[in-house]
Image (cartoon, rainbow, N blue to C red):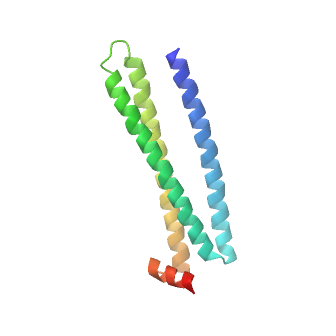
Amino acid sequence: MKKLLYQKSFTIFFVLFLFSFSLMTIQINHTLASSSRGDWKSDVKNIDLLIKELNEKKLGYEGRAVSLENQAQRLQFDQGELSLAKKKFQLADQNRKLAEQVEQEIQFLKQKKAEILRKHNIETVEELESIDEK
């Protein structure tokens, strides 16, 4: 019974992750496509917002991974709870993998932001802020 419950909850979690990841990818592609149209300042701001959102998601996955691992470590010493502990360890690993995928997206966005800034001869945040003030 517990095994079925965890399989269902993981499936739901994974489907929601794929859905949100797909939406985020669409948003990233839209942002990057619009950078060729010339509104590069707003593109940089949008990339910064996406990076912030992704960092929050990554922290959530990492936090869940730590929580699941702590639960699993407690359960592994309880009589008859070894299979549940293994499942929690697996879920913790999956959350860590999701956090790694999000980190890759963050690095990709940082590279794109740097490319946009280089294209417009901006090397520091101060230079970008001084342009925004004008």
From the viewer's perspective, tell me whether residue 131 is left or right of residue 89.
right
Residue 124: tell me if it is visible.
no
Quarter of the image for the C terminus: give it.
bottom right
Q: Give the x, y percent position of residue 123.
A: 45, 80
Q: Give the x, y percent position of residue 23.
A: 65, 51
Residue 24: tell me if it is visible.
yes
Extreme residue toward the left, this view: 77
Tell me which residue sits at (67%, 62%) in the image: 30
Q: Give the x, y percent position of residue 107.
A: 47, 60
Badge count: 0
Considering only vertical position in the picture, is 79 above or below 101?
Answer: above
Considering only vertical position in the picture, is 129 above or below 94?
Answer: below
Q: Give the x, y percent position of residue 94.
A: 47, 37
Quadrant housing residue 112: bottom right
Quadrant housing residue 86: top left
**Front-most of 55 and 91?**
55
Extreme residue toward the front, this view: 133
Extreme residue toward the right, this view: 37
Considering only vertical position in the picture, is 13 above or below 61?
Answer: above
Tell me which residue sits at (37%, 33%) in the image: 69
Tell me which residue sits at (46%, 77%) in the image: 125
Tell me which residue sits at (42%, 44%) in the image: 62
From the viewer's perspective, tell me whether residue 130 is left or right of residue 80.
right
Quadrant housing residue 13: top right
